[in-house]
Image (cartoon, helix red, strand yellow):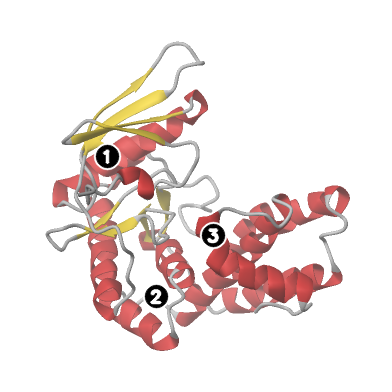
Amino acid sequence: MKSNKHKWTDYFRDTTHATLDLGKLYLRWLPSDRKETVDKEYWAQSIISAVNLAPKPYFKFHFPKETFPSLILEEKIDFHKVYKKSDKFITDTAKVLRKIHNLARKQKKTINKHIPEDKLLSGGAYDPLVILNVFVLSPLEKLKKSKKNLVTKTVEKSLIEIEKRIAELDKKVAYKKEYCSLIHGDLNDTNIVRTKKGKIMLIDWADCRWDIVTCDLSQFIYLHFLTKREQKLFLKTYDASWVTEEMIEIHRLLLIGWDIIYLMTVDLNYETDKADRLESLKRKVWVNNKIPI
């Protein structure tokens, strides 16, 4: 009979990750140039694992020589391999995110010693137009020179429309530094797992940072293809009165813009875990010449 044991590596699709199963522990390592990533993961998981919402890390180690990888030894959790979106999954994830965000705010000083505020926050607050320029509009200008065949009229019209809509929505939003916290930053279906005991846990904290929490909320909505009903359920369960439809829409538009840029940087070839949303976006923009918003 074949073993039904689930391997962590089924979820780490990032090729820079490598994992050694040590029975009750996992030893993971990343390339030497990812030292800061290992440090962030270690401290984020140390804090979040205290409430059993992330694997507990036991130690991290950086070799003195740059050619050797950085290591992190952490708890091995037993979880269901199959991803299934349901109302319970949506509400449980909302509760977990709220708990993590609130916990992190209470420990802000400690967290910021190891995971500083995102450098693009303006006075501790979020500015979507700055994010748009850094991650979408500036890269577009470079791609116009290196990927002329991919920067079609539809691409340019799409990003112009995204910029226009974000600017309009931004006028209706007042961002405050109190809206920020430690965020996970990569809430795809591989990083949210349900343990065999029924708890939701978040793994792979490589992209964590101190940023506005609607980055997590909107990313979850976007990456899990939530319907309007599911989105309403998710936000109602998260239960933060300051979160507005405008904020969520701004992040959705930023994610679409980022995906368009990403598709061009990989010449329209992409990893399988991104295929669901990117195949549809690629077809809409480059085949049907439609603005995807």
User: Closer to the camera, 122 or 247?
Assistant: 247
User: Rounded to the nearest whole Å, what is the CA distance between mark 2 and mark 1?
Assistant: 26 Å
* Residue 47 rendering spot, x and y as whole percentages: 22, 44
Determine which quarter of the picture holds residue 22: top left
Taking the spot 30% from the left edge, 43% from the top edge, the residue there is 44
- Looking at the image, tell me whether mark 2 or mark 1 is earlier in sequence order: 1
Residue type at tag 1: Thr
* Residue 204 rendering spot, x and y as whole percentages: 36, 46
Q: Which of the two marks, 3 or 2, is nearer to us in this view?
A: 3
Side of 279 where 125 appears, left or right: left
User: Rounded to the nearest whole Å, what is the CA distance between mark 3 and mark 2?
Assistant: 27 Å
- Residue 247 in view in this figure: yes
Please name the residue that numbered disc 3 is placed on. 274
Q: Quadrant of the C terminus?
A: bottom right
Taking the spot 45% from the left edge, 69% from the top edge, the residue there is 218
| Circle 1 residues within 10 Å: few <14, some 14–19, many ≥20 | some
Side of 156 where 115 appears, left or right: left
Taking the spot 15% from the left edge, 52% from the top edge, the residue there is 51
- Label for residue 110? 1
Residue type at tag 3: Lys
Please name the residue that numbered disc 2 is placed on. 243
* Residue 52 rendering spot, x and y as whole percentages: 16, 51
Side of 27 where 119 appears, left or right: right
- Looking at the image, tell me whether mark 1 or mark 3 is earlier in sequence order: 1
- Looking at the image, tell me whether mark 3 or mark 2 is earlier in sequence order: 2
User: Rounded to the nearest whole Å, what is the CA distance between mark 1 and mark 3?
Assistant: 34 Å
